Image (tube, helix red, strand yellow):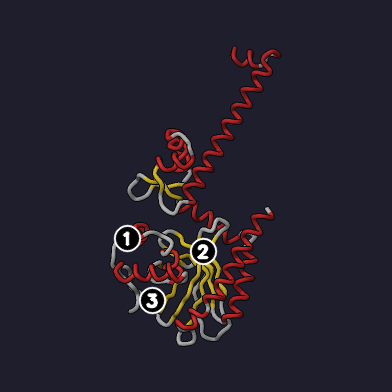
Amino acid sequence: MSSFIALNTKNDAPKRLATVTRLETSKSSMAEKVLLILETVANSEFPLTLEAISSRLGFAKPTVFRLLNILLAQGLVERDLHGRRFQASTKFRQMGIGLLASDSVRSERIAIIKRLVTTLGETCNFNIRDGNEVLYLDRIETTAPIRLHIDSGMRVPLHCTASGKLFLSFLTEKQIRGILGHEPFDRYTAKTMTNYKTLLPVIDRIISQGYALDDCEYLEGSVCVAVPVRDQKQKVFAALAAHGPTPRFNLALAEKSVLLLRGAALEIEKSIVEDIELK
């Protein structure tokens, strides 16, 4: 009680103001550090150790450890399978997916994809990687009488889809093995690759050519092609894909579609940059 009276005396007004200011600054500083840690973990392509986060940000390890525990408690960060590294949680990824599905850029993205579908005459998808699966975020159907019905929000495997293999091509072999796990992988058609011996050379080819193909590996009678979409930091965060039934859409036509897909992907990338600049 005596300390309360002392802080309310006229002479101690500057001291009280300084104390409040320090407390507010401390809270602000902690909030900024939490956000920087979350950003560092979320932007990393692989789980990070406590030491790595501390080194990248220049924060003391005890501080990082304390703030990571806050993020763990809130479910925004999680430990990897070995428990020693930290990565963005499913909850945090879902928040990001929600933003992509409803942000101000989406209407422009849909308009771009619709124009692409009209030009190609085949269904096109805007997909992202969510853990060990591909998530169909946006999908515009062709008006052709024969088409494949896959709903937005559907999840498909990485190892046997064009978008999935494209995402894998931007990871190291160690990361790929960590995500796909033990072979054999699930088989969906006679053409599904079920082991690393056949999959990894295909990933190498995707790296060199810059696009990925799915030759009836996930669905019988379906050919697909996918190209990367990059954010303002040139990091691949999505795939733009086109697919159709054989023989109307074969591998040769899929490869001819790459130039149009890349043009549409570039339009989407520009819309993201312009949106950021406006904000």
For the residues labelled 3 and 1, say whether their Cβ atoms are less than 8 Å apart: no
- Say whether residue 120 is left or right of residue 155: right
Residue 80 in sight from this viewpoint: yes
Q: Which residue is mark 2?
A: 238
Where is the N terminus found, in terms of image quarters? top right
Q: How many marks?
A: 3
Which dot marks residue 217?
A: 3
Who is closer to the viewer here, 193 or 252? Answer: 252
Residue 153 in sight from this viewpoint: no
**115 relative to 75, above or below:** below
Expressed as whole percent of the image width and height from the top left, the position of residue 142 reads: 57, 80
**Label 1 vs label 2, nearer the camera:** 2
Q: Secondary structure at mark 1?
A: loop
User: Which of disc 3 and disc 2 is earlier in sequence?
Assistant: 3
Crowd around label 3: few <14 · some 14–19 · many ≥20 (10 Å): many
User: Which of disc 1 and disc 3 is earlier in sequence?
Assistant: 1
Residue type pointed to by label 1: Gly
- Alpha carbon of mark 1 to alpha carbon of mark 2: how far? 22 Å
Which dot marks residue 181?
A: 1
Crowd around label 2: few <14 · some 14–19 · many ≥20 (10 Å): many
